[in-house]
Amino acid sequence: MAGGRGDRLGEVVSVAMPKNLHKALEPFLIIVGSLSVSMVLFGGFVALAGANPVEVYQTMYRAAFGTSFSWQNTLIRAAPLMLTALCTALPGYLGLIIIGGEGAVVIGGLVAALTALTMPTAPPMVVLASMALAGMVAGGIWLAIGGALRHYRAVNETISSLLLNYIAIAVLNHLVTSTFRDPESLNHPSTHHIGEANMIGLIPGTDLHWGFAFGVVACVLTWFLMHRTVFGFASQIAGGNVRAAQIAGLPVGRLILIVCFVAGAAGGLAGMVEVAAIHGRANDTLNANYGYAGILVAFVARNNPLAIMPVAVLLGGIRASSGLLQRTHELPDATVLVMQGIIFLVILFSETLYGRFSKFQKQGAS
């Protein structure tokens, strides 16, 4: 009798819980578990460094989310992470591992700044629109190079996109120290300033620039593109089985180029925002490792553009806490980079756990 009641209860729970929820529960639990393990490992690291792990986490929370100022600082740092995460997330639908977001940011920011300098008398809105378009096109082309090399020449996209980062940084350093250098930028070679009138303003009532809104809109639009359109469905088919997609007549090469271009455009927009909202000019501050941090955001979010938004806020908060950790606990500001590295390694290890929980598999199939 007890066994019969238990079986009926299991059937009721199975019926009440949609099949899609079973599928979503496994990655959710694995990600939460991975982050928990990362926190334990990082706690051990700071303990070895002579700090109290509990107090460190309290400080990090206070610095990231404790006040309205902390929240705004966190969201400012999250804005470029949303966009650079798309550089890795979107090609992931095609089974590609692209890590060239840093190069797209650098090239996009550089081209956006130079575009503004060629339009000294144009209205600010025209300048900003031109900067955004130029930065997105430049970033899109830059990342599409890696996709083209992968499809047409069978060059590993991870290696080629990584090397393209260094080429982009070298191009930036060369141009801002020679051809386009502002003579007044003595100790920090930069281009000329784009002009205060051409800077992106703040969201009314906040100290948060419009780049955050760009990131949210980009994540929502790309999610719709990849999950609610024929193009997105075709991309996922090609990512699941390239050979089957080719037999079905899908233009795999065109899909790769378009997806990589859209992904790079997001990175180029991030570079444009860094120039127009923060620095006002192009220099080596564009190489701020937002592209590399975006890889971690995309992996934790499992390439889901909607999940990228909260993950970017979380990682933005971690990065925003570095200064307070240094002042309060005398830890180096690079401590947060150690935490990012630990999270990255644990997330990579957790990939081996998917599909190993038979309970979720049976429930999802029933």
Image (tube, rainbow, N blue to C red):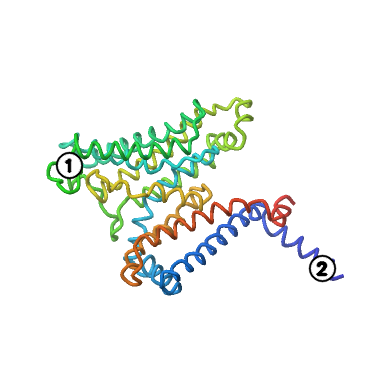
Q: Is residue 304 left or right of residue 69?
A: right
Per the image, label 2 sits on a secondary structure element best described as helix
| Amino acid on which the number 2 mark rests in the picture | Arg
Using residue 23 as the reference point, say whether residue 35 is left or right of it.
left
Is the residue 298 above or below the residue 10 in the image? above
Q: State left or right for residue 4 relative to residue 133.
A: right
Which callout, 1 or 2, points to the residue nearer the camera?
A: 1
Residue 66 image position (x, y, % from top left): 37, 70
Q: Residue at x 34, y 56 (%)?
A: 76
Which amino acid, mark 1?
A: His
- Circle 2 is placed at which residue position? 5
Dot 1 surroundings within 10 Å: few (below 14), some, or many (20 or more)? many
Q: Nearer the viewer, residue 305 or 87?
A: 87
Q: Which labelled disc corresponds to residue 133?
A: none
Residue at image position (54%, 64%) is 36
Q: Position of residue 116 (x, y in %)?
A: 22, 38
What residue does disc 1 label?
192
Q: Earlier in the sequence, mark 1 or mark 2?
A: 2
Residue under the point 61% across and 37% down = 240
Element assignment for label 1: loop
Which residue extends farthest left? 184
Judge by depth and name the residue closer to the eye, 224 or 60.
Answer: 60
Residue in the image at 51% along x and 54% along y: 345
Q: Is residue 203 above or below residue 265?
A: below
Relative to 244, does residue 305 appear above or below in the rendering? below
